[in-house]
Image (cartoon, rainbow, N blue to C red):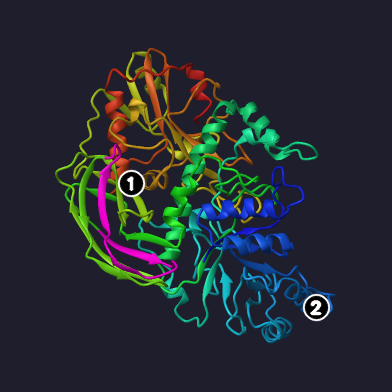
Amino acid sequence: MRRTEYDGASPIKNYPSMEKSDWLHLIGIAKEYGLNSLRFHSWCPPKAAFEAADGLGIILQIELPYGFGPGQKSDYPLLELRTILDAYGNHPSFCMLSLGNERFTHNDDTKKSIADAKQYDPRHLYTCTSHPLAMNCVDDFFEAADGGTNDKLIVGIEWGGGDVVSSSRFNTKSPETKSDYRNVIKDFDVPIVSHEAGQWAMFPNLNEISKYTGVLQNTNYERIKQALDDKGLLDYAGDFAMASGKFAAILYKEEIESALRTPNFGGICLLGLTDFQGQNLAVVGILDAFWESKGIVTPKQHRMYFSSTVPLARMVKRVWKQNEVFTASAEIAHFGEKDLFKTHSNWTISSEDGKVLFNGQFKTLNIPIGGLTSLGDISVLFNKIKAPQKLILSIEIPSTEIKNTWDIWVYPSEVNLSIGKVKVVNTWDNNVKKALESGENVLLIPKLESLKDGYRASCFTTVFWNSIFKKYQKAHTLGILCDPSNPVFSSFPTDSFSNWQWWDVTMNANAMYLNNMPKQLKPLIHVIDSYHINDRLTYVWECKVGKGKLLVSTIDFTTEIEKRTVSKQLEKSILDYMNSEQFNPKTELHFTDIDNLFY
């Protein structure tokens, strides 16, 4: 099962009455992105929605509004349930029903309602609540974010918004594609569907403001736009939205594939395919609140990892050295209409420009529906190809749409640094000023305690849901933004946004503030702040000062650096750049400007 929530609150542009044609349009979008189910969060949609879903082959999960709270009559939920079953129970799309969203009372009332519903209309599947689960319930299925406790997650982060830095494996473990949830679900007798998976925040696209017409006004976005303008960041708004959105889509992909890699997993329910404008604003959708594309990921790209048949690759890591043997175990999750007989599938590893460097074919297999099938193993030695570079692993069934890809990176076996003519220092003091006044090139890697305005905690991922509604988020950040064509990255292949190879860098870096610096200062590596705060943040920036040139980095290039190939390669790229004629910062600052940053 592949579905998303729909709370009914999103402003569907030009569809105020939501007739059947409007539902066909909306549900058609969901199907185009690979979904086969919709969950209606705490409500029951009208007849038109059922009719549209019937025609499009989409299954629906209906939910009762809250009805088990203090002061409610115990028979109220049952009456509402029977009314829904009487009105819509004959629709083939009506598959599942939950007694409500996040009810934390598993009691005799809920058990009785489930038992009565099964007796009254046994054609559907019933559960007490959409999270949490309870082993003593009589549910036909569970929908939950964990297996009963926060240390048994079946989503990417602790439900309820644990601090993302310490509560998500995407931050606490180096990137890989082998994790799954089999040990969490192994003791359950009924299927489990993940609850509100994803919730990876991104920066809003402020160009959407013009879509809010008539009685609607997006004051959230208007305030963010003003805050960016005040900080001198408004010109970056579009880039922040795209970079953080691309990054969030990468996180979503791995979270979805973690579920698909899990044998006997019941399905995955995304929190939302669209943004949510409530609860202090949650920009978590690959589509905007109007169900329109943000340009982050196309429907075809999304269906590669979110459809009825998905190739999977289990890798112990994403970053490899030239002298290592790259290995991956290939599988395919197949939940299509029929078995696939005598299926030929293959794999390739290509460069970013599309040149095939390695390829192979798996043995011919019959692929049954309803689970995982092993395709075979991949093994390659990278010692004869250029490094560093980003590569793309692909697994596909030729002449079909069944294909999936993964970014991997190969780095030199040994990274050789040359300080050259660069003066490397850790303290901003008179000696550094003298060096700059005499025309030297200085790399300043300041100690954190020397930063007057403090710093943000190290973090790879974006924040969960949003940075203020849930539990406190230490970092509040949404990934990085950089220009891959800048010569500072000539020896460090990168996208303009965070990708998996940035994990080692960002988990060993602290963003510094540039709020009080001249607005013409443009970082080499922006750190995108939460839209609730909108500080000017950076890992790396440069300027001319005195007769010299200064580059400042808050990335740790010291701690266990010999084990951290990616960070060492970035350090090499920075030093090579500073030793070249291309090191020519455009912004000129005064010593007093920099004095304001450090103790």
Identified at 26% across, 54% down, the residue is 347
Q: Residues within 10 Å of mark 2 (few under 14, many from 20)?
A: few
Which one is nearer the viewer's eye here, 599 or 594?
594
Which one is nearer the viewer's eye here, 491 or 49?
49
Q: Give, as a three-letter code, the residue at label 1.
A: Thr
Label total for image = 2
Res 568 quadrant in image: top left
Main SS class of the magenta portion in the image: strand
Q: Which residue is mark 2?
A: 79
Q: Is residue 562 above or below residue 429?
A: below
Q: Is residue 205 above or below residue 78?
A: above
Please say whether residue 370 is one of the residues in the magenta stretch. no
Identified at 58% across, 63% down, the residue is 58
Residue 23 locus on image (x, y percent): 67, 54
Residue 391 locus on image (x, y percent): 28, 44
In the picture, measured across the screen, residue 199 lies left or right of residue 350, that is right
Res 346 quadrant in image: bottom left
Identified at 65% across, 45% down, the residue is 290
Residue 217 locus on image (x, y percent): 75, 38
Determine whether the residue tagged by mark 2 lies in a helix, strand or loop.
helix
Which one is nearer the viewer's eye here, 233 or 599?
233
Determine whether the residue tagged by mark 1 lies in a helix, strand or loop.
loop
Circles 2, 1 touching at the beta carbon (< 8 Å): no
Residue 454 in view here: no
Q: Which residues are magenta?
A: 328-354
Q: Which residue is mark 1?
A: 559
Q: Give, as a three-letter code, the residue at label 2.
A: Leu
In the picture, measured across the screen, residue 67 lies left or right of residue 192, that is right
Mark in front: 2 vs 1 = 2
Residue 148 locus on image (x, y percent): 55, 75
